[in-house]
Amino acid sequence: MTENEISYAIIGIAMELHKNIGAGLLESAYENALVYDLRENGFEVKQQLAMPFIYKEVKQDIGYRIDILVENKVLIEIKSVENLAPVHFSQTLTYLKLSCIKLGLLINFNNKLLKHGIHRIVNNL
């Protein structure tokens, strides 16, 4: 599957999840539920994936964690906040660049309608 096909499926699964449980929970609840549903739909999913931070060819002891990685092609950053801030978009794009992944979804589950909380972010797609 291509990145676009995977993201289309992810969005559908996320919207069904949101329809069933609504807004107002912690990010971890949405993350774990989404991981469960993605796996139930046959996707290879990695959760809280630790990634090294390499600066000027030196691997740093500090790193970052990708919330969800689907099929090693689509990164998902989960939020449950009143409003997304510009830093949330920057963070997702930086994670894409550092991991050399082309497509990310920034999903804020704290919306009455989830379609207003889903944002596609691309890195040289």
Image (cartoon, rainbow, N blue to C red):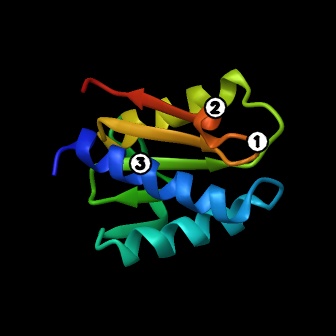
Tell me where residue 80 appears, x and y as whole percent: 75, 49
What label does residue 112 carry, if any?
Answer: 1
Spatial CA span between label 3 and label 2:
19 Å
Give whichever of discs 1 and 3 has the lower sequence position: 3
**Amino acid type, residue under disc 2 in the picture:** His
- Residue tagged 3: 75
Give the amino acid type for the residue marked by disc 1 in the picture.
Answer: Lys
Could you give the CA–CA distance between mark 1 and mark 3, rounded to whole angstroms?
A: 23 Å
Q: For mark 1, does the 10 Å Cα neighbourhood hold few (<14), some (14 to 19), or many (20 or more) residues? A: few
Q: Is residue 74 above or below residue 29?
A: above
Residue 1 at x, y percent in the picture: 16, 52
Numbered tag placed on residue 73 in the rendering: none
Residue 99 occupies which quadrant of the picture? top left
Indicate the secondary structure of the residue bearing disc 3.
Answer: strand
Residue 125: x percent and y percent? 24, 27
Residue 110: % across, % down: 76, 46
Asked if the residue under mark 1 is in contact with the one under mark 2, i.e. CB atoms within 8 Å, the reply is yes
Is 120 on the left or on the right of 116, as rendered? left
Query: Going 53% across and 65% down the picture, which residue do you hit?
Result: 34
Q: Visible in this render: residue 52?
A: no
- The vertical placement of 108 against 10, above or below, is above
**Which residue is located at x 71 percent, y 58 percent?**
27
Q: Disc 2 designates what residue?
A: 116
Q: Residue at x 47, y 71 (%)?
A: 37
Q: Nearer the viewer, mark 1 or mark 3?
A: 1
> Of tags 3 and 2, which is closer to the observer?
2
